[in-house]
Amino acid sequence: MTADVTRLIAYYKSPLGRISRTLVREQVIGLAEDVSGKRVLGLGFATPYLRFTMEKAERVLAFMPDRQGASAWPREGPSHTVLCDPLEMPLTDAAIDLTIAIHAFEHVADAEELMRELWRITAPNGQLIVVVPRRRGIWAQRDNTPFGQGNPYSGGQLDKLLRDHSFVPEAWRDGLFLPPVQSSLVLKSTRLFERAGRILAPAMSGVICVRARKEAFPAIARRKREERFVRVPSMNTATARHG
């Protein structure tokens, strides 16, 4: 089931939502490195993680799936949000230097078609950052957060999906080792959980984060979509009949 935008907004306003955003954003910023002059796209519900790109990037767009719904972002100034079908994004070929996909892959109906579309819109040597719930992680087992919705991934599944569609993984990071509970005791011990999790159970993180680079040639061609033409019969104007 796709998490709708009102629930996503409510989650990120909660104490657990604010903490998880901080922890995941640290991994995203580390993977993104320097975004100066880049054309950046946030896909899914990535706006809680895009603020760091606003000042340095050439432009920043936030595409939200039509099934999810959209909210205006940022709060100040013109909105950068676009409501669209992620499998047919309103962009020209090679239009984006960096895509940050969060709450996207686990909700899309056809991940392979999404990868083909991402390859199309990504500039040569452009990059893709993907954040997905880890299949074995506790966050994927609990449905009280957005990371417990949709289809989680293992590291091997994500690696294969990327490589099969001409994106080469360059760097991997893990995040969210704290339990997904709205407990003040747990939230106060966030850093302790993160440090202990990385040492004792690195394969049990809540999310997998990866940065991949686009290869020059697509491994799999996009599916050709059939255009449908509807024949409209010619009709003469008719007058009403009176019985």
Image: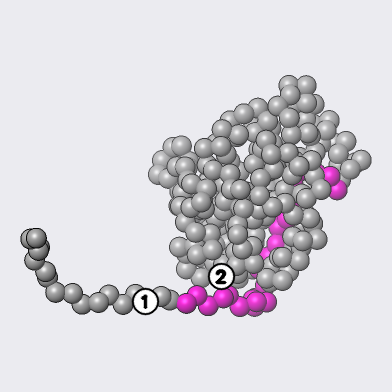
Q: Residues within 10 Å of mark 2 (few under 14, many from 20)?
A: many
Between 216 and 19, the one lying in front of the other is 19
Between 191 and 13, the one lying in front of the other is 13
Q: Is residue 18 above or below residue 201?
A: above
| Residues in magenta, as a range | 203-226
Q: Secondary structure at mark 2?
A: helix
Q: Give the x, y percent position of residue 102.
A: 63, 49
Residue at 69% in and 52% down: 151
Name the residue carrying label 1: 229
Between 142 and 175, the one lying in front of the other is 142
Q: Give the x, y percent position of residue 166.
A: 68, 71
Between 129 and 55, the one lying in front of the other is 129
Q: Which mark is residue 120?
A: 2
Q: Is residue 101 visible?
A: no
Residue at 72% in and 71% down: 164
Q: Secondary structure at mark 1?
A: loop
Residue 242 position by quadrant: bottom left
Q: Residues within 10 Å of mark 1 (few under 14, many from 20)?
A: few
Amino acid identity at mark 2: Arg
Q: Is residue 114 visible?
A: yes
